[in-house]
Image: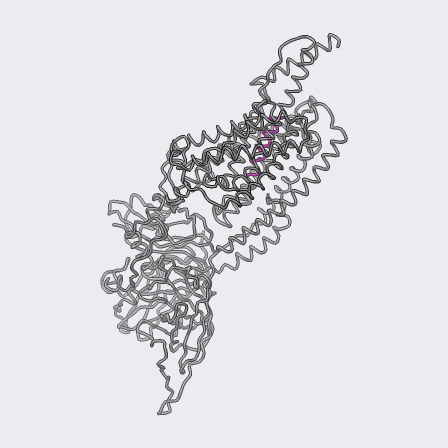
């Protein structure tokens, strides 16, 4: 039952196995590699940037950081409401405290008991006017921890002491316990004590063995609770001389309807990103597509004219409970079949197969990334420059600002692209992190709207309340003249993406904006340092 | 017996007499009894905390009560061991020796072991939470180690009390022999009451650990009586055998009943509300554990029957006591359950509206309906319960006899 002794036999193995598990830190959630959320919004009279960083274990304390971008509020509170019970079933708001030495930053750790979707209410009070922003957050178990050598040694030492101590006490109890004070134990009792110690040792060994099995069972149970990628198969096939990508979800939870129904985000059921994974280091290609759901489990899209080769596939899905999940795979895109036209020149045959033709929101481009701060030459002329408004350190919240100019050097006028001012895709070069962000941050605006609609609408306290009406986000956002937080309300030439690089490493940031009806894609390489000092 | 040796015996008897009255017991016995009380208070408080407030830190009063118990027991007994081993010239030799170097009371050694186990569980638990999350389950390996630590402290307190009780009985025996020569009244001792108190705390802890199987809606299931038969005949028979009181099991059960009633009546007087979501029932005051089981009645029955069996073989005694326990337990708890699930029990005295915040409000309905099973299942389970009750009573006899014999 106690663990100490079996630590002797198991700790070594555990250290290596768990250490390996820690290295295999491939975590899958709404965004790949992290549940981190960065959100910018207006809380009353105060523009705020909220950084939520759920650790990979559940239950846990989740650090919430609120950076007040202007003004001096008197109070900041945070509160987490689980999606299925809302604020009626949420604990009271808790006060954040100002972080010493970092003016305008307030922080608090929120207790989260279950892996679920939460609306985090950040309320800011002060003379400039009080208000609240709602930030969607999801928590999931994504990691286990190894045991440090020192800690293991201490536990083994204490465990050995406990085992030896218990055996000694049992021996002494049988040998001397009933002997009157001042007398020596008779030989029969001395023998009895030895027998008792031997039997106790056997029992204790059995208990430790049982304890070890118990630990293993707990470990397995935890592993089962850990978030796993949604099982799927993706392949590109040639159909009527057209490259056709089919994504079939094979996950047993999906097939047995244990996910909430999926919900369109920016009007699309799936946002699919193909990012070239081979070829020259200094070149890449990105396709941002919106496959058609031809069957409950199957999505199909044509593959646009991107170079043949190996691609990383990320398919973002949003669920009605506000959960975001990403399908992940690697696919090989074959060479596009080319058929000679009548005049002898090459011509691509466009088929009339089931998949619709690619639409105006589908965008693809080969890119030659430049470094952060440099000018990227856009395909239809002009430049985009991406800068960061703070030092690019892991975990530091900042804004990535994309400034777009026309060929003649004048500022470009950007129009909404699928209801958002722009889209940015962040990929760590080892594919361990992938995130999709907008000028409001990494949170999905539809998830936020969904959580707020649920909160407003129903009075049920339990999970049973269905969502009466599923609205496409275009209805929510298309009419809004992209009055995105942190941006001027007139048509902008620059976009700010609030973000925090979750870990150190080499990143590639793809930025997509719409100008003159055309989607422009730029790519920037960013080297992120571990947080200094 | 010559006059000098008679005088010596009488002196010894008077010293024993003086020690046997309240206030002159070994101070470390008082310390470990306090520690055991603190542990039980902390344990019940902590469970209530998790039903009411939900989230905790190391520094909740409930945790502090548990750790205070560990610290007081460990330090008091550790001090006593060091004093006896290195700073006491006299060879008192009323403790047991460990590793040929250290000498101390047997119960004290157990308390020290329990304190070290609790100490060990702290870094282990810390790592566990970092690896697998905060309190995914209440019963985890580090928590089991912690529980083993304070179980051992309770056991240590009990053993220290029975050792004192045994020595007190020896002194009284010596006094009686002397008094038969010189005449005089037999002094009364309080050690048996301390034994009953410590035994009652152990019984309360056993009931808390099995509380999951003792929901009132399960009181018409066979499994309820299977678990009862596994645990309680052992504790009650051991109490009847080890406590040098005519009604030892009864006294022990009274302590258990009082502990559980006091928490039931006191906790809801204090305000408390959840600090952790999802909150499914709005709770405004501390949620208490359930009304105690009616163990008092089988305890009285055991005390009444036991003296009549004294000359019988142990297994026969165990069979009679085990069957008696089960009959009285079923005959009292089963009909009492009808009252507990009725609306008549929804008052401060029985407090059956003790719903934790994380349960939906309609769970109150489930708390007022018996879980059902077929009659054949119940009968089969009661058959198992009879066997377990006899085995449990036999183990209780053995343990109780050994406890009665302890002198160190």
Expressed as whole percent of the image width and height from the top left, the position of residue B108 reads 61, 30
Q: Is residue A228 a member of the stretch shown in magenta?
A: no
- How are the residues colored? one colour
Dividing the image into 4 quarters, which one contains the N terminus of chain B? top right
Looking at the image, can residue B32 be seen? no
Tell me the quarter of the picture where residue A298 sits. bottom left
Expressed as whole percent of the image width and height from the top left, the position of residue A243 reads 41, 78
Highlighted range, magenta? B147-163
Q: Main secondary structure of the magenta part?
A: helix
Tell me the quarter of the picture where residue B10 sits. top right
Question: What residue sits 73% from the left and 7% below the top?
Answer: B3
A47, B236: nearer the viewer: B236
Expressed as whole percent of the image width and height from the top left, the position of residue A465 reads 33, 53
B382, A245: nearer the viewer: B382
Q: Is residue A531 left or right of residue A162?
A: left
Question: What residue sits 31% from the left and 44% below the top?
Answer: A75
User: In the rendered view, would you say A418 is above or below B236?
Assistant: below
């Amino acid at each position: 039952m106690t663990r100490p002794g079996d630590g002797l036999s198991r700790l070594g193995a555990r250290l290596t196995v768990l250490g390996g598990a820690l290295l295999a830190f491939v975590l899958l959630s709404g965004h790949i590699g992290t549940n981190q959320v960065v959100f910018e919004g207006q809380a009353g009279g105060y523009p705020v940037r909220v950084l939520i960083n759920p650790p990979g274990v559940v239950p846990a304390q989740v650090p919430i950081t609120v950076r007040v971008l202007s003004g001096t509020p008197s109070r900041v509170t945070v509160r987490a409401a689980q999606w299925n019970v809302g604020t009626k079933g949420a604990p009271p708001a808790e006060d954040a405290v100002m972080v010493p030495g970092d003016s305008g930053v307030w922080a608090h750790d929120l207790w989260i008991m279950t892996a679920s979707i939460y609306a985090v209410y950040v309320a800011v009070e002060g003379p400039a006017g009080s208000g609240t922003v709602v930030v969607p957050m999801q928590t999931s178990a994504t990691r286990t921890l190894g045991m440090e050598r020192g800690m293991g040694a201490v536990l083994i030492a204490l465990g050995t002491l406990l085992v030896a101590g218990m055996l000694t006490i049992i021996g002494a109890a049988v040998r001397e316990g009933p002997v009157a004070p001042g007398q020596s134990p008779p030989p029969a009792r001395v023998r009895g004590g030895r027998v008792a110690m031997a039997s106790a040792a056997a029992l204790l060994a059995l208990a430790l063995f049982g304890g070890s099995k118990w630990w293993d069972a707990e470990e397995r149970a935890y592993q089962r609770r850990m978030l796993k990628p949604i099982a799927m198969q993706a392949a590109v096939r040639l159909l009527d001389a057209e490259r056709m990508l089919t994504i079939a979800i094979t996950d047993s939870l999906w097939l047995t309807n244990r996910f909430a129904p999926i919900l369109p985000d920016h009007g699309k059921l799936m946002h699919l990103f193909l990012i070239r994974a081979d070829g020259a280091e200094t070149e890449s290609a990105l396709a941002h597509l919106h496959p058609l759901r031809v069957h409950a489990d199957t999505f199909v899209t044509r593959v646009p004219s991107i170079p043949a080769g190996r691609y990383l596939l990320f398919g973002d899905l949003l669920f009605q409970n506000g959960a975001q999940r990403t399908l992940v795979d690697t696919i090989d895109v074959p060479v596009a079949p080319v058929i000679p036209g009548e005049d002898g020149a090459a011509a691509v045959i466009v088929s009339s197969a089931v998949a619709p033709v690619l639409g105006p929101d589908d965008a693809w481009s080969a890119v030659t990334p430049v470094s952060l701060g440099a000018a990227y030459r856009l395909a239809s002329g002009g430049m985009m420059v991406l800068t960061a408004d703070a030092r690019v350190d892991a975990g530091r919240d900042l804004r990535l600002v994309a400034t777009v100019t026309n060929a003649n050097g004048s500022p470009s006028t950007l129009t909404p692209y699928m209801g958002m001012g722009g889209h940015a895709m962040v990929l760590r070069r080892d594919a361990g992190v992938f995130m999709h962000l907008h000028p409001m941050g990494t949170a999905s605006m539809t998830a936020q709207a969904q959580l707020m609609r649920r909160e407003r609408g129903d009075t049920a306290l339990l999970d049973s309340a269905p969502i009466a009406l599923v609205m496409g986000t275009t209805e929510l956002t298309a009419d809004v003249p992209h009055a995105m937080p942190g941006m001027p309300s007139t048509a902008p030439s620059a976009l700010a993406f609030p973000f925090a690089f979750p870990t150190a490493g080499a990143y590639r940031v793809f930025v997509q904006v719409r100008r003159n009806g055309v989607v422009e894609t730029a790519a920037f390489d960013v080297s992120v340092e571990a947080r200094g000092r | 017996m010559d006059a000098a040796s008679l005088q010596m015996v009488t002196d010894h008897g008077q010293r024993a007499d003086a020690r046997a009255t309240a206030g002159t017991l070994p101070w470390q016995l008082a310390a470990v009894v306090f520690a055991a009380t603190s542990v039980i208070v902390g344990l019940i408080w902590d469970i209530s905390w998790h039903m009411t407030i939900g989230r905790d830190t190391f520094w909740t009063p409930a945790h502090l009560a548990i750790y205070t118990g560990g610290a007081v027991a460990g330090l008091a007994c550790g001090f006593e061991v060091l004093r006896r081993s290195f700073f006491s010239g006299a060879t008192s030799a009323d403790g047991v020796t460990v590793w040929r170097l250290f000498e101390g009371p047997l119960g004290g050694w157990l308390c020290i072991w329990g304190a070290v186990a609790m100490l060990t569980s702290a870094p282990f638990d810390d790592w566990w939470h970092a690896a697998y999350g905060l309190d995914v389950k209440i019963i985890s390996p580090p928590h089991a180690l912690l529980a083993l630590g304070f179980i051992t402290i309770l056991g240590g307190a009990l053993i220290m009390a029975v050792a004192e009780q045994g020595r007190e009985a020896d002194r009284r025996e010596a006094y009686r022999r002397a008094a038969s020569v010189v005449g005089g009244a037999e002094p009364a001792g309080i050690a048996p009451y301390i034994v009953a108190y410590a035994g009652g705390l152990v019984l309360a802890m056993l009931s808390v650990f099995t509380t999951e199987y003792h929901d009132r809606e399960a009181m018409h299931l066979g499994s309820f009586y299977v678990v009862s038969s596994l645990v309680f005949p052992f504790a009650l028979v051991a109490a009847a055998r080890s406590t040098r009181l005519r009604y030892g099991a009864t006294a022990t059960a009274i302590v258990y009943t009082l502990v559980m009633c006091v928490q039931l009546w006191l906790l809801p007087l204090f305000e408390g509300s959840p600090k952790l979501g999802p909150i499914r029932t709005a709770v405004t005051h501390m949620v208490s554990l359930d009304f105690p089981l009616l163990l008092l009645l089988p305890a009285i029955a055991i005390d009444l029957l036991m003296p009549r069996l004294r000359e019988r073989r142990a297994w026969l005694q165990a069979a009679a006591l085990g069957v008696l326990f089960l009959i009285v337990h079923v005959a009292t708890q089963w009909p009492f359950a009808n009252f507990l699930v009725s609306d008549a029990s929804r008052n401060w005295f029985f407090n059956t509206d003790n719903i934790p915040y994380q349960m939906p409000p309609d769970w109150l309905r489930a708390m007022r309906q018996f879980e059902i099973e077929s009659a054949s299942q119940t009968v089969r389970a009661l058959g198992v319960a009879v066997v377990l009750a006899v085995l449990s009573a036999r183990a209780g006899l053995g343990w109780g006899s050994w406890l009665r014999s302890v002198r160190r």
